[in-house]
Image (cartoon, helix red, strand yellow):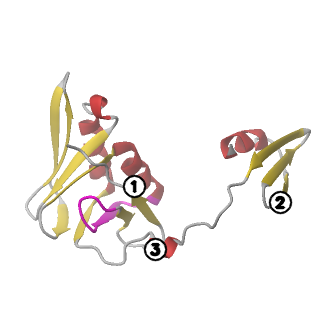
């Protein structure tokens, strides 16, 4: 919905927005876009971001994205799901395909604190989160295998991205 409004705004200098408790109207020139608003309270974001994390990975953003992209080539069967295995000695990103095989990518330069951890996630979500930070190094902070994890700039914690892992069997 908002993508359509954004598209209509190209080349325009103004938009008029009117809203009630149930609808929002966007008037752009002679075009009116209406949308229904969802009732309810917005979730308290203070409860979404984990306060205590047990595992911490600091890595170069480009190295992480490239490794995920290379492994992701074989994740066709699993809808862009990749696995991240971490220990103090190694970081591995892997993906499997029943038709093609498997891929394992290793990241050589990293800092990891915590016990061994294995987590699966949608590769696109993590790549977009890392890109949005726009930093050279990123920190991934984990609570556990099936808990949402934090992706943030290693030197500036003002922007926090949350990614939910995926259960794999």
Split into 4 quadrants, where in the image is the N terminus? top right
Q: Which residue is identified by label 1?
A: 130
User: So how many labels did they put on this image?
Assistant: 3
What residue lies at 45% left-to-right and 60% top-to-bottom? 133
Split into 4 quadrants, where in the image is the C terminus? top left
Can you tell which of label 2 and label 1 is closer to the viewer? 2
Q: Is residue 134 magenta?
A: yes
Report, in whole angstroms, how far the alpha carbon at label 3 lies from the one at label 2: 28 Å
What residue lies at 10% left-to-right and 65% top-to-bottom? 88
Instruction: Rate crowding at label 3 as few (under 14), some (14 to 19) or many (20 or more) other CA atoms within 10 Å.
Output: few
Front one among 119 and 36 = 36
What residue lies at 32% left-to-right and 53% top-to-bottom? 165
Q: Is residue 115 magenta?
A: no
Q: Which percent across, then down, holds residue 51?
A: 36, 78
Tell me the magenta residue range: 133-147
Q: Which residue is identified by label 3?
A: 47
Q: Secondary structure at mark 2?
A: loop
Q: Which percent across, then down, holds residue 117?
A: 16, 60
Mark 3 touches mark 2? (CB < 8 Å): no
Residue farthest to the bottom, as pictured: 51
Residue farthest to the left, as pictured: 89
Report, in whole angstroms, how far the alpha carbon at label 1 lies from the one at label 3: 22 Å
Q: Which residue is identified by label 2?
A: 20
Instruction: Rate crowding at label 1 as few (under 14), some (14 to 19) or many (20 or more) other CA atoms within 10 Å.
Output: many
Q: Secondary structure at mark 3?
A: helix
Q: Which percent across, then down, holds residue 39?
A: 68, 59
Can you tell which of label 1 and label 3 is closer to the viewer? 3
Decide which of tag 1 and tag 3 comes sooner along the chain. 3
**Left or right of 7 on screen, residue 25:** right
């Amino acid at each position: 919905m908002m993508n359509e409004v954004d598209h209509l705004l190209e080349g325009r200098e103004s938009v008029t927005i009117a809203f009630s408790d149930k609808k929002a109207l966007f008037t752009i020139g002679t075009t009116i876009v209406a949308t229904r608003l969802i009732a309810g309270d917005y979730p308290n974001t203070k409860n979404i971001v984990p306060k205590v994390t047990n595992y911490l990975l600091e890595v170069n953003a480009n190295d992480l994205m490239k490794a995920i992209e290379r492994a992701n080539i074989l994740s066709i069967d699993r809808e862009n799901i990749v696995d991240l295995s971490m220990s103090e000695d190694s970081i591995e990103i892997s993906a499997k395909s029943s038709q093609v095989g498997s891929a394992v990518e290793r990241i050589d330069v990293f800092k990891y604190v915590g016990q061994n951890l294995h987590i699966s996630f949608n590769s696109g979500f993590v790549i977009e989160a890392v890109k949005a930070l726009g930093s050279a190094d990123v920190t991934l902070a984990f609570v556990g295998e099936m808990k949402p994890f934090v992706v943030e700039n290693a030197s500036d914690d003002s922007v926090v991205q949350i990614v939910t892992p995926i259960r794999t069997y």
